[in-house]
Image (cartoon, helix red, strand yellow):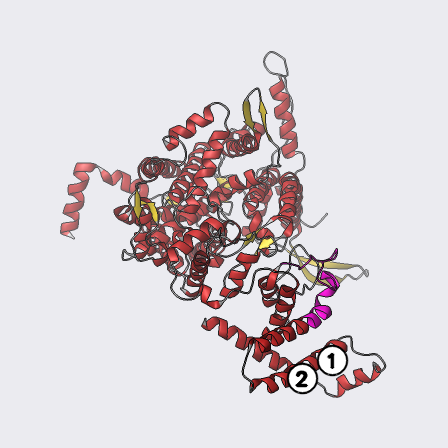
Amino acid sequence: MRFTNAAASYIDERTSISGAVRELGRKIFPDHWSFMLGEVALYSFVVILISGTFLTFFFDPSMSHVHYEGSYAPLRGIEMSAAMASTLDISFDIRGGLLMRQVHHWAALLFVASIGLHMLRVFFTGAFRKPREINWVIGFVLFILAMAEGFTGYSLPDDLLSGNGLRIIDGMLKGFPIVGTWISYLLFGGEFPGLVVIPRLFVLHIMLLPAILIAALGLHLLLMVINKHTQFAGPGRTNENVVGVPVMPVFAAKAGGFFFVVFGVLVLIASFFQINPIWNYGPYDPSPVSAGTQPDWYIGFADGALRLVPPGWEFVLWGWTFSFNILVPVAILGLFIVIVAIYPFIEAWVTGDKREHHIAERPRNAPTRTAIGAAGVTFYAVLWAAASSDLMATHFRLSIEGVIHTLQALLFLGPLIAFLVTKRVCLALQKKDREIALHGYESGRIVRLPGGEYVEVHQPVSEYERWRLVSYEDYAPLMIRPNDQGRITLGMRMRAALSRWFFEDRISPATKGELEQGGHH
Amino acid sequence: MSAQRGGIHHNRSSLKEREDHSTMGIDSTTKDRRRTRAGRRHPLASVALILAGLVTTGGAYALFTSTATAGTANTAIVQQQLVEEGEALFAANCASCHGANAEGTGEGVSLHGVGAAAVDFQVGTGRMPMAAQGPQAEQKPVQFTEEQIDALAAYVASLAPGPEVPDESLFEGEADLANGGELFRINCAMCHNVAGAGGALTEGKWAPALMGVEPKHIYEAMITGPQNMPVFNDLNLSPEDKADIIAYLKYMEETPNVGGFGLGSLGPVSEGLFMWIFGLGAVVGVTVWIAARAN
């Protein structure tokens, strides 16, 4: 006791750390399962760092040619790059190497997947609203960095699959008019594949990208602490407080345990399920392309966009080749991710809402936003599915042309249908909530009144439940008002139109007066 | 080699089982059904009759000649016998699409010059006779015995010269796995996938999975180019190269997957789906559990 006291004051006198510990230790985390998805991403990133460090001890990021002489018989004597040979050595000749490789790759898949799910949670609960818009953008940057990390890592072993992936990148770069060829030469140090791309990607993969990622991650967590965590509405939970458990000791213990659970799940998967068997793919050779060549799931949407382009979109004009088969999908994907990045600002402008929001909304209580999200998810899902069009054709006994044409149509119709259906479902759920708040649940008990009338007895909801049902923001469409100069600008008209589109159909929460009247109407 | 023998044995035993079933299966209900059908011959009766006749004459012939010394005259006669048997089988099972003289019709191609190897592959893997017209002949349980397939092959081979059924010595013995793997990736993987898991082709056609295919049939596919497959002749891939490819495929088939379950060897799609459904599913399950414990 005496020793710990002395040690603590020794450290505190030299670092003034007690202030930070007090601040952090008292930070409150509300309890909801969906608030832990970001944690999953964080923990899988730690697993990636640990397993990745192990791999760097043995991986040789060089494209110099060697003859493989390791233990995997079917590749012995084959010429390949040192990168591929060292990856094979990690898999077959280094103790624990294959497990670490598989942990690293599976953890990467979980990392990006959990970021995606975390973003969906934040989007659908409106947790990106003021004051958290900046943190949404930082989180978006993290998502892009995670994909870049994944893609560079996928390319490093220099096997057939990764080489094919790089070939697509090369083709996309070359699709840009005028500068494309030069950018490609710059990246590959001459004509594809060249001898420099693996060492360059290695530097990006283990140094530059992780450094930016960790910095952005630190900022992301710092802003989360500064902004406090959102919480769902409930008795005692207001926009001004955060109800939950403090970091010290409960949350820290839970989070620490959860880290090991995530780590354990990943090691378990890596022990029992093969991932990226590069020895099947063989060394990269520009001539063969295997059937069923796909990128890892998170790049799938981009691959799918390329697969859905109809034929004949490339033409030669004035001696230049215009590859709209590449430019159009790249432009559409670029537009899509930019909209994702700036969505908080778009919505803030449309609603004109400048207040701070710390209560996470239930998705049904923001029908238009939820519908926009559903449309976006559908759009992404169609592109994603398109990346596996060949596997859908073989496994469901379809013709690949039929699959592609269906997905082409769904790319446009799917988001539209998803928007309309989701909005109606949200409004219906809101109506149901309002009904329950006012009249309670249907009990199923039918009573005959003395006058002969039959009524069903309704069971009133508890205070706690009712709070959840009625506490949400009720927005109304903005009215067009002239500004100081007495004019109505085009921007105002657009904003009013969008606002009307957002909030025209709405179900207001039951008011206090209505609740007091209850069923007696 | 052992797999090959096992395959034949399996065919024979399954045929025997089928016969047993048919004799044992005549109980009262089937008799009743037969009686109502009296007056009409079963559609397969004529085939059965021809078969029975051929088998008895063939069997008797074999009995008589077994003691005699084998000579060229005898093998010629045996061959002739086989061709005739094959012709009868052909007339009963194949002629409706391929034409009475295998000259081809609108429904099926001419078989002049396809050789014994093509017949042995198509019939020996159950692709022929086709159950229905479709984008591609589907693999299904083999319909004939090894002897019947040989007879059909002999008949088709007698029409015009074509590739012969390969001798087993062609794909036995020592092989260069590394060469086989490299040739497989360069020549085969673009349709059949690097792990031989199969892949999609245009218009509803597909390249089948290559695991569990007999070496003989792989070899025949390479020299005859069935369905949409191109022919890999001996100038393109020498017999040794073909043997190496077969050895590589057999190695992949017999060696346990390194690193755990292969998830169908379909690459990143099955890996991604697995992570989303089972990996993320498990982790989200844990988050729900942790949050629930708090309340």
Q: Are marks 2 and 1 on the same chain?
A: yes
Residue B271 in the image: state x and y as whole percent. 46, 53
For disc 2, the chain is: B
What residue did someone put label 1 on? B49
Tell me the tag on residue B56: 2
Which region of the structure is painted magenta?
B87-113
Mark 2 element type: helix
Chain for disc number 1: B
Q: Quadrant of the N terminus of chain B?
A: bottom left
Residue beneath the point at 57% across and 63% down: B117
Q: Residues within 10 Å of mark 1 (few under 14, many from 20)?
A: few
Between B269 and B93, the one nearer to me in the picture? B93
Q: Position of residue A357 (x, y in %)?
A: 49, 36
A377 is within the stretch colored magenta: no
Residue in the picture at 56% in, 85% down: B68
User: x, y percentage for residue A419?
Assistant: 64, 40
Establish if A114 lies above or below B43: above
Q: Amino acid at mark 1?
A: Leu
Circle 1 — which element? Answer: helix
Q: Which mark is residue B142?
A: none
Q: As rendered, which of B52 and A81 lies closer to the eye? A: B52
* Of labels 2 and 1, the one closer to you: 2
Instruction: Please give left or right for residue A484 compared with residue A143 in the image.
Output: right
For this orientation, the residue located farthest to the top is A485
Residue A377 occupies quadrant: top right
